[in-house]
Image: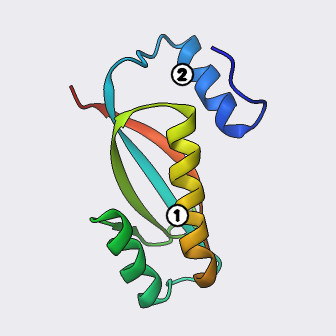
Amino acid sequence: MDWPNDPDGEVFRLLQSQGFDFSKTYVIDFNVDFDRWPPDPEALAALKSLVGEVTIFEPDQYGPGFAQFRFQGLVTYEKVIEIQRQITDAMTLYGGRCESWGVGSDAT
């Protein structure tokens, strides 16, 4: 497959090189970072209204805090980019952005 030369495309190339099965359904974790911590309660309410359940990870010795939500489906470049764009567009007002993601467990 041919993915763009950007950070997300690099993740897809890495997954492919590790034998990732793109034909299966997976749980994808998306992280939302905020300029200020804690995020505005309105931001979290808006995020929850868009994606459902949201898990909050408080800042610790490993890094700043972030909010995380999950999507279950096929792992495609187009879907990952679409979700990141939609969430970033909605969270920009609150100083938030969705720029990182990871593949969780095989859901099928």
Q: Residue at left 58%, top 12%?
A: 17
* Residue corresponding to mark 1: 87
- Quadrant location of residue 97? bottom right
Image-based side of 94 in relation to 23, left or right: right
Number of numbered labels in the structure image? 2
Can you tell which of label 2 and label 1 is closer to the viewer? 1
Quadrant for the N terminus, please. top right
Residue 35, horizontal then vertical, whole percent: 65, 78
Badge 2 vs badge 1, beta-carbon distance below 8 Å: no
Image-based side of 86 in relation to 28, left or right: right
- Quadrant location of residue 6? top right
| Residue 81 visible at all | yes
Query: What's the CA distance linking mark 2 and mark 1?
Result: 23 Å
Image-based side of 43 in relation to 48, left or right: right
Residue 92, horizontal then vertical, whole percent: 63, 76
Q: Residue 13, relative to residue 90: is it above or below?
A: above
Q: Residue 12, relative to residue 2: is it above or below?
A: below
Dot 2 or dot 1: first in sequence order is 2
* Residue corresponding to mark 2: 15
Residue that lies at the very extreme toward the left in this rendered image: 108
Image-based side of 40 in relation to 97, left or right: left
Q: Secondary structure at mark 1?
A: helix
Q: Residue at left 41%, top 60%?
A: 68
Q: Secondary structure at mark 2?
A: helix
How packed is label 1: few (under 14 Cα within 10 Å), some, or many (20 or more)? many
**Number of the label disc, if any, that sits on residue 47:** none
Amino acid identity at mark 2: Leu
Q: Residue at left 35%, top 47%?
A: 71
Residue that lies at the very extreme toward the right in this rendered image: 5
